[in-house]
Image (cartoon, grey):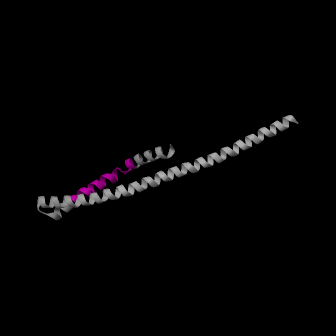
Amino acid sequence: MGVLKAIQETSDKALNSGEAYIKVSQEYYRLKAFQQLARAFSFLSKLAVIGGLFFLALIFLTVSTAIWLGELIGSVSLACMLISTGLFLCTLLLYFTRKQIDKIIIRKMSKEFFD
């Protein structure tokens, strides 16, 4: 009977160790999910604030450049058309390079997510 009792004790220890491992694993994955969510929320918050300020700066820069160019060439409407054409060309450039931009973003996010 000593052998059976030893096997029973070993089985109980293995069961307890397995349960403890599962609990610790669950806690780890909860913390990992929280970390990823916190990083994502932090990134999106910074993106909104910095992006909003950058957008406002771009608007003021565009308007002031159009006014300056209009005074330089003598036609504000022509200056506005030149500025809008430049912005349109920049947009087209970004549109045609969107796949490369996606690859860069996915590469950077995968390093953050899987580390």
* Left or right placement of residue 35 versus residue 70 in this view: right
Viewer can see residue 43: yes
Residue at point 42%, 55% (across, down): 44
Residue 57 screen position, x and y as percent: 28, 57
Residue at point 42%, 56% (across, down): 45
Return the residue found at the far top: 3
- Would you identify the image quadrant in which residue 67 lies? bottom left
* Chain part drawn in magenta: 82-101
The overriding secondary structure of the stretch rendered in magenta is helix
* Left or right placement of residue 97 versus residue 43 in this view: left
Foreground residue among 91 and 43: 43
Residue 93 screen position, x and y as percent: 30, 52
Foreground residue among 103 and 14: 14
- Would you identify the image quadrant in which residue 48 lies? bottom left
Residue 32 screen position, x and y as percent: 55, 48
Residue at point 70%, 42% (across, down): 17
* Left or right placement of residue 77 versus residue 87 in this view: left
Q: Say if the magenta span includes residue 95.
A: yes
